[in-house]
Image: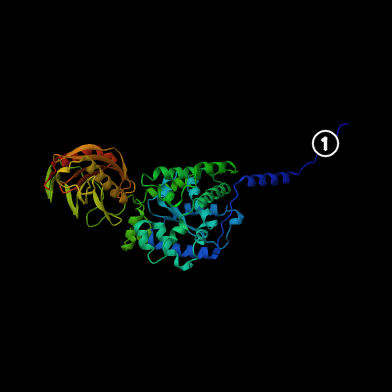
Amino acid sequence: MHSRTMRRRIPSSIVAVLLTASLVAAQTPISAPQNRYSPSEDVQLGQQAAKEVGQQLPLLRDDQVQSAVTTIGQRLVNAVPNQFRHPEFRYSFDVVNVREINAFALPGGPMFVNRGMLEAAEDEGQVAGVMAHELSHVVLRHGTAQATKATKYQVGALAGAILGAIIGGTTGSVVSQGTQFGLGTAFLRFSREYERQADLLGAQIMARAGYDPRDMANMFRIIERKSGSGGPEWLSDHPNPGNRYDAIVREAQMLRVNNPRRNSNALVRMQARLRQMPPAPTTEQAIRNTSNGRSRYPDNRYPDSRYPDTRGSTGTIGVVAPPSNRFRTYEEGVFSVSVPSNWRELDKGNTVTFAPEGGYGNVYGDDTFTHGMEMGITTDKTRTGGGGYNYGGDSNNTTNVRNATENLIESLARTNPNLSRATGYSQASVDTRRGLRTVLNNVSDATGERERIELFTVVLNDGRLFYALGVAPNGDFSRYQNVFHRVMGSIQIND
């Protein structure tokens, strides 16, 4: 006996619903953590902290750049899943004119993207990836959820502490004085579980907005690669939840992106606009500039000129004359040196700089030079292996010279975040004393162009480190290096 199979035609509309349901089910489910703050308190806190950010950090008031970033941000907000929408939230998207690769968002909606992040991105999707991650922290209310785990603080007392966490370092500690210790960290430096949630929800929001979520994973790799040996600031506040890249890629494979956005013309135009502006300062330079009451341009608006106005007490960055073949000798305390006769002596405390007209000036409140040499003596004495100070006859000890040189380079890197080592150490002679030589790479504060620095070091008889560094743009370095070596050959140390 043959049984008869009954077949029913399923309407196409139901098939579409089932397919959509299966796609949604394939996504990693995300649930907002417990939170005893109200969404309106998120808004109150975020608006207060955003006001502090605007007063302490230089916001880039450029219509073209602002419009491009806001367009990306609003596209992502429109793609937030319904269960995470908060009608009372007040979203805004601002660019901070500092060079570090970083971004952060505040409770209730304000988001800030560093100019350094925009300049590092390779396509629009990568910018959207970082912004989607930050947006996910906002809509999941991670800041106030994390504070829920601690004592319930009054919302009005938190803005300064949050700003201190944003700025970080010693400057941040000063900004957050008078507030409860650790509050800023609680609101902005998230746990690995919250990072995992922001990665996955961010990927889902990207897909809904028409971006490829893998761009987020690629941007995180760029951040790691471009942040140098000092460690990426963004990733220090956003710890890797483990296998971050692979987890985002797996999530992306479960998501459907209809007509993914591949056109990055807006980003190209925005980056071209940024290149027309003066180079961005570090956050530390920007904070110091603000605290001293100075501003590079009214309302942080930038003209179309390529270089900043660097006129100040010490000169103007501009056209640089080639080094003169004639040399002039200067007595500088414990040493004497001969330099090209068309270089000026710029004495400042424990250091002296020799630079040509057009090769030195003042940028963001700091003296800088693009061509020339700086010489100085560190105040800290090098230590011997036994923990004492290295006085007298051991001044040629290579280990002591190397350790002191490493400390000097670390000190230079704190005010030059793009500083990196180009070569290893080689032996050098400074007035018959054994010393070290190395070459460093950097980006000029004055021009935003890459430069090379040749560094010479030797330990004095009293244990202090004498150093001399020659600076020139990459294109001029080989020509100036001969001058640097001639100057080093003229040095006489009288200690």
Image location (x, y in percent) of residue 227: 39, 46
Along the line of sight, which residue is nearer the eye, 483 or 296?
Answer: 483
Left or right placement of residue 259 versus residue 465 in this view: right
Direction right: furthest residue: 1
* Colour logic: rainbow
Res 295 visible: no
Q: Is residue 256 above or below residue 135?
A: above
Total number of numbered labels? 1
Query: Could you tell me which secondary element the residue under label 1 belongs to?
Result: loop
Give the amino acid at mark 1.
Thr
Q: Residue furthest top?
A: 1
The residue under the point 59% across, 47% down is 28
Residue labelled with disc 1: 5
The x and y percentages for residue 120 are: 42, 46
Quarter where residue 54 is shown: bottom left
Give how far across and how far down residue 130 sits, in percent: 48, 49
Query: Which quadrant of the structure image shows residue 473?
Result: top left
In the image shown, does 398 or 349 lie closer to the viewer? 398
Disc 1: CA contacts within 10 A as few (<14), some (14-19) or many (>=20): few
Residue drawn 55% across the image and 61% down it: 35
Residue 429, given in percent of the width and then of the height, sits at 17, 38
87 displayed left or right of 164 = right
Q: Residue 151: in sight, yes or no?
A: yes
Q: Is residue 441 left or right of residue 204?
A: left
Q: Quadrant of the N terminus?
A: top right
Q: Nearer the viewer, residue 32 or 273?
A: 32
